[in-house]
Amino acid sequence: MSWNYRVVKKDDGYGIHEVYYNEADDICMISENQIAPYGTDFHELRGDVHKMEDAFGRPVLIYEEIEFSKD
């Protein structure tokens, strides 16, 4: 299983969520709530923010249209 951050349109707004993929790269889970950057020190926090920035280079997911894989 792999994961990344993605921009997700949910209800009337946008947020960054953790999205988990199965081995076929199909979405199998998504965080229920949007995620805030976190780190136990400055460098970890900075790295997390950079991972979140990568989400802006991927297509926006529309929550209601996500087809979750059962695998």
Image (cartoon, rainbow, N blue to C red):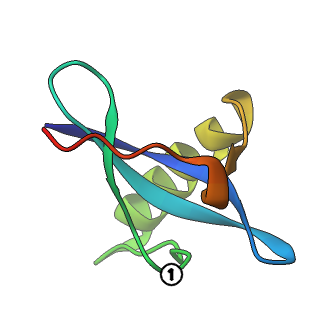
| Left or right relative to 26: residue 65 | right
Residue 9 lies in quadrant: bottom right
Q: Position of residue 47 (x, y in %)?
A: 44, 51
Residue 60 lies in quadrant: top right
Residue visible at 46% across and 43% down?
67
| Left or right relative to 26: residue 35 | right
Quickly name the residue at label 1: 33
Q: Position of residue 38 (x, y in %)?
A: 42, 75
Crowd band around label 1 with a 10 angstrom C-alpha radius: few (<14), some (14–19), many (20+): few
Residue 56 lies in quadrant: top right
> Type of residue at label 1?
Asn
Q: Position of residue 36 (x, y in %)?
A: 53, 78
User: Is residue 69 placed above or below 64 in the rendered structure?
Assistant: above
Residue visible at 30% across and 23% down?
25
Closer to the camera in the image, 67 or 40: 67
| Left or right relative to 62: residue 49 | left
